[in-house]
Image (cartoon, rainbow, N blue to C red):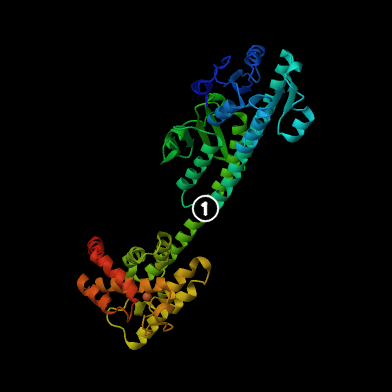
Amino acid sequence: MTSEKRTLQLKSKGQTTPLTVENPGQPPWPVLVVDDDADVITITRLNLRHFSFGGRSLSLVAASSAAQARQILQTSPGFALALIDVVMEQDDAGLQLVRFIRETLCDHKIRLIIRTGQPGLAPERYVIDHFDIDDYKEKSDLSAQKLYTTVRSALKSYRDLTTIDMARQGLETILGAAPRMYLHPLDSFEEFYSGVFTQILGLCHLGAQSTVRIANGFLAMFHKNEITIKAGVGEARLEKTTPPVQESLSATETVIPLRIRNETIGMLYLEHGQPLDPLALHLLRIFTGQVCVALQSLRVQQELRQAHTTAVQMLSEAAEAKDANTGEHIQRIVLLTRRLSLAMGIDAETAERYAQASQLHDIGKIGIPDRILNKPGPLDQTEFAEITTHARIGGMIIKDEKNFGVARDIALYHHEKWDGSGYPEGLRGEEIPLPARIVSVVDVFDALVNCRPYKAAWSLTEAVNEIRRLAGRSFDPRVVEAFCRLHDEGMFAELIQTTH
Ligand SMILES: [Fe+2]
């Protein structure tokens, strides 16, 4: 809150005009004086009129009773200090007010100083032992100089407590963010930066419309706590210019390099309405260090994923080279497997895994002689028996390893049939892994609607009728149901038009 706003807020409650020595940029310390003696309040004002601590003056608000003080504290929280008389509407009104502040309002940060004119009614030892106060003074002892010293030391203690509290909150934010950065499934850099910006927003208390930019091309706009990320913005500009250094920026800009070992992988650039305080900057640097490590881990994760995809593509291309007829067939299988999986209500991530794995369904054909694979005409019994071994060969080529489990299931079982009459193991029903059941429908459908050395292409209607006829015999009825839904939506007609 700015000094101007704070002053206005206190004025609007109809309290005494605040005593302020304005210091633009730094709000005055808000102090509450509670006393039923108007003279005491006047003297307090006079004695503190030139007060300054940490470049900040005082904003004094007066209350003439404990009841009025309660009302002020409830409607205008955030006082740094309260000077409280003991005997007001009751003999212990001031002490009850202390209890109200600490126990009801749960304000443990505000510094409380008891000032009493009748120490007999509230003995120092008793009050110090039983009430959570920071100092006890007899009014007769409080000369102008002593009051100045007492208020100064109380405000110093408040400032230190506030600093510790902010550091605690900042560290809490950082510690809370770490598991989210590592454990949350981060699918893209955009999602990653979105999380980072949210944390920075909280960490630096950045207001609406602040801008955060990372030099490798992401821009985030904060507006009313909504975050918009724009990828690619500023990339070209920043590539051509030297990364900005902190010394060349204004007080409302901050640049922090993102470094992994000795490599600068990007720059974090912030524009903020007010200069960042040293604590926020320190926390931001700690947080940025964590961001770098998480970023590196995300990079490695993406590189591994890419390496896996490339390995699968290379293998499937090896199979394609062997069998000239299956070139585009594989691409259609991938597309249809993805669509059919989604139509069955399978989540997008799993559908994509099935689709990528389907590329390897006929990898076993690598082990089948060319004269059989490319024979222009029907196969005899021996040749057919030989070609069926491609399923087992595929299962042997693709190891039973976590990342290739789906691909292996598909390669090994895509010729199994729902009624148990398929090969290589004669599995039936749900014994056949689901991705293999999906690919078997897709594989047969694609073979039907396209030419083969041994047959002409069927029409779409003929092919769909055939798939429907084989539901419960060759195919899982649920897969066929989803397949028919896709057909009704016109998906296959569109596909055949674009690929033929
Ligand atoms: Fe096959």
Q: Position of residue 138 (x, y in %)?
A: 75, 20
Q: Is residue 451 visible?
A: no
Specify the amino acid type for callout 1: His
Ligand 1 rendered quadrant: bottom left
The C terminus sits in image quarter: bottom left
Q: Is residue 158 left or right of residue 348?
A: right
Query: In the rendered image, which quarter is residue 367 located in?
Result: bottom left
Q: Which residue is mark 1?
A: 184
Kindly identify the residue that appears in the image at 53 percent across and 34 percent down.
Answer: 205
| Residue 148 position (above or below residue 272) | above
- Mark 1 Cα within 10 Å, few/some/many (few <14, many 20+)? few
Q: Is residue 156 left or right of residue 199?
A: right
Q: Is residue 289 visible?
A: yes
What residue occupies the far right of the structure in this picture? 125
- Number of dots carrying numbers: 1
Q: Is residue 43 left or right of residue 299?
A: right
Which type of secondary structure does the marked residue at label 1 adopt?
loop
Viewer-closest of 443 and 92: 92
Query: In the rendered image, which quarter is residue 168 located in?
Result: top right
Kindly identify the residue that appears in the image at 59 percent across and 40 percent down.
Answer: 287
| Residue 449 position (above or below residue 122) | below
